[in-house]
Image (tube, rainbow, N blue to C red):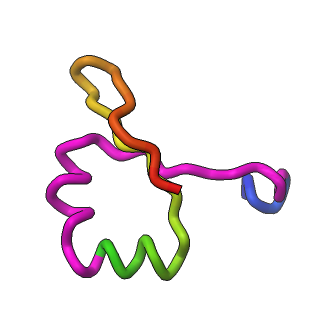
Amino acid sequence: MLEVNEPDRLLYLAVPLETYETFFQSQFAQVAVERYQLKLIVYEPVIEEIVQWRS
């Protein structure tokens, strides 16, 4: 709905570092990220820090 209501807004999927290092390293996840051009913010939840922006 955000895309419909605010089409100029860039949307990012925020994922914890551990999830990024496990699930998002699989071939399935890499294909999905590329195919759907997902933008990611990888963060460390314990210290509340952004580790990586992936556009």
**Residue 17 position by quadrant:** top left
Q: Is residue 22 magenta?
A: yes
Give x and y (percent) for residue 16.
Answer: 29, 41
**36 above or below 10?**
below
Q: Can you say which quadrant of the picture contains the N terminus?
A: bottom right
**55 above or below 48?**
below
Residue at 19% from the left image edge and 73% from the top image edge: 26
User: Disc count in the image?
Assistant: 0
In the image, taking residue 31 as reference, residue 24 lies left or right, namely left
Range covered by the magenta-colored residues: 6-28
Residue at 54% from the left image edge and 71% from the top image edge: 37
Q: Is residue 32 magenta?
A: no
In the image, taking residue 18 as reference, residue 34 lies left or right, namely right
Q: Can you name the residue that lies furthest to the top here?
A: 47
Give x and y (percent) for residue 4.
Answer: 81, 61
Residue at 20% from the left image edge and 62% from the top image edge: 23
Give x and y (percent) for residue 39.
Answer: 52, 57
Residue in the foreground of this view, choosing between 23 and 5? 23
**26 above or below 15?**
below
Residue in the foreground of this view, choosing between 54 and 7? 54
Residue at 23% from the left image edge and 80% from the top image edge: 27
**47 above or below 23?**
above
